[in-house]
């Protein structure tokens, strides 16, 4: 297969995301075949130049490459379980977890497919722009999905794309929850969310800049307190808990943050720097 825009691609699943994927392939000049359980969703794409496959088998036979984007992995297994996969190249961009990705890779490979798993860290309207991050893992691709956005190949383990995707969710919700906590606190003093947002953004960007240095400490397993010791951080965490409680806003997130630090301090890590908490994250919670 070549990396040119003339690689024929079939898109299976034309929900909000699948339609955006197919449209981006069409725009980039790929001969594009589409299939969807509810065929009416293909009408606009067909008007824009896509070829409609009458059956899932026809879709799998049409593309040099078949991109699958359904609701979830059980839907993928249900649909592809009916079809012959021998000799196909499947790129499954359906969201799920790494266990589902590895199981589906083994299942598809046993049935003769070359299977790559992927994750889309983007919304449909950004597909086709460089802001759309597409992650791939599994056998090294010899095709180019650059029409979709910024594509990163992460390695042979088919679970990696989903694992990065889910790790990214941890980042996203942690940042959003931290912002909501601060917003709830400031609203008690009449500060509106829009006033606090730029300040919060500045803090989030500043903290994000610490990550590569802190990652170095984790990878070395050595946590000298170059900036502050965990026990100093824990005192600030107590302020966060007490302030939240006295303002009458939700204190669960501050309490959790402090409880994790307290456990690490009790285990003798009070003099170490913050990333020593990786130990708390690497085992099941209490
Ligand atoms: P959606 O609009 O709900 O579309 C779901 C698609 O799955 C439809 O084409 C649906 O077919 C098909 N489907 C479901 N069960 C099926 C089955 N048993 N057999 C055959 N087809 C089946 O969802 P979406 O937004 O496109 O999302 C698709 C995937 O992309 C999800 O895994 C989602 O997490 C991921 N994703 C979405 C976004 C986003 O912003 N939308 C962002 C990142 C990742 P019918 O049309 O016939 O119902």
Image (spheres, rainbow, N blue to C red):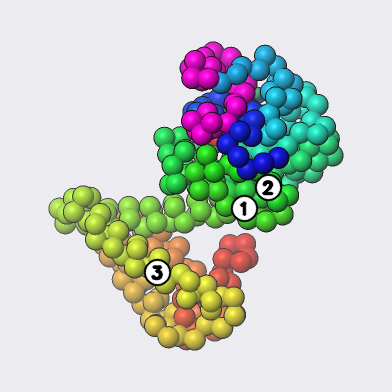
Q: Look at the image and say whether residue 40 sits in the magenta stretch.
A: yes
Q: Is residue 224 visible?
A: yes
| Magenta stretch bounds | 24-49
Which of the two labelled residues, at mark 2 and mark 3, occupies the earlier sequence position? 2
**In the visual, does 161 lie left or right of 121?**
right
Q: Within 10 Å of the Cα at label 2, are there few (<14), some (14-19), or many (20+) other Cα atoms?
A: some
Q: Which residue is mark 2?
A: 141
Q: Look at the image and say whether residue 44 sits in the magenta stretch.
A: yes
Residue 57 picture location, percent across and down: 74, 21
Q: Are marks 2 and 1 in contact (CB under 8 Å)?
A: yes
User: What residue appears at the point 64 percent right and 30 percent down from the top-left corner?
Assistant: 8
Q: Is residue 247 visible?
A: no
Q: Which mark is residue 153?
A: 1
Q: Is residue 198 above or below residue 224?
A: above
| The C terminus lies in quadrant | bottom right
Tag 1 secondary structure: strand
Whole-number angstrom distance, CA of label 2 to CA of label 3: 32 Å
Q: Which residue is mark 3?
A: 209
Residue 128 picture location, percent across and down: 47, 38
């Amino acid at each position: 297969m070549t990396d040119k825009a003339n690689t024929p691609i079939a898109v299976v699943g034309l929900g909000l995301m699948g339609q955006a994927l197919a449209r981006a392939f069409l725009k980039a000049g790929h001969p594009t075949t589409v299939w969807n359980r509810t065929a009416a969703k293909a009408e606009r794409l067909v008007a824009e130049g896509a070829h409609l496959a009458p059956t899932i088998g026809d879709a799998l036979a049409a593309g040099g490459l078949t991109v699958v984007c359904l609701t979830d992995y059980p839907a993928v297994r249900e649909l592809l379980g009916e079809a012959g996969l021998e000799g196909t190249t499947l790129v499954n961009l359906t969201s799920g977890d790494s266990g589902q990705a590895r199981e589906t890779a083994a299942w598809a490979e046993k049935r003769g497919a070359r299977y790559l798993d992927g994750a889309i860290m983007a919304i449909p309207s950004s597909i086709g722009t460089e802001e759309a991050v597409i992650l791939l893992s599994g056998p090294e691709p010899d095709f180019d999905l650059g029409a979709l956005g910024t594509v990163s190949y992460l390695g042979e383990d088919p679970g990696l794309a989903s694992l990065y995707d889910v790790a990214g969710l941890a980042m996203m919700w942690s940042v959003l929850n931290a912002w909501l906590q601060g917003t709830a606190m400031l609203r008690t003093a009449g500060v509106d969310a829009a006033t606090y947002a730029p300040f919060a953004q500045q803090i989030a960007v500043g903290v994000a800049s610490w990550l590569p240095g802190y990652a170095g400490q984790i990878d070395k397993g050595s946590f000298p307190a170059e900036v502050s010791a965990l026990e100093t951080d824990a005192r600030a965490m107590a302020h966060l808990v007490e302030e939240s409680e006295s303002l009458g806003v939700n204190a669960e997130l501050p309490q959790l943050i402090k409880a994790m630090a307290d456990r690490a301090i009790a285990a003798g890590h009070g003099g170490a720097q913050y990333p020593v908490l990786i130990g708390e994250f690497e085992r099941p919670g209490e």
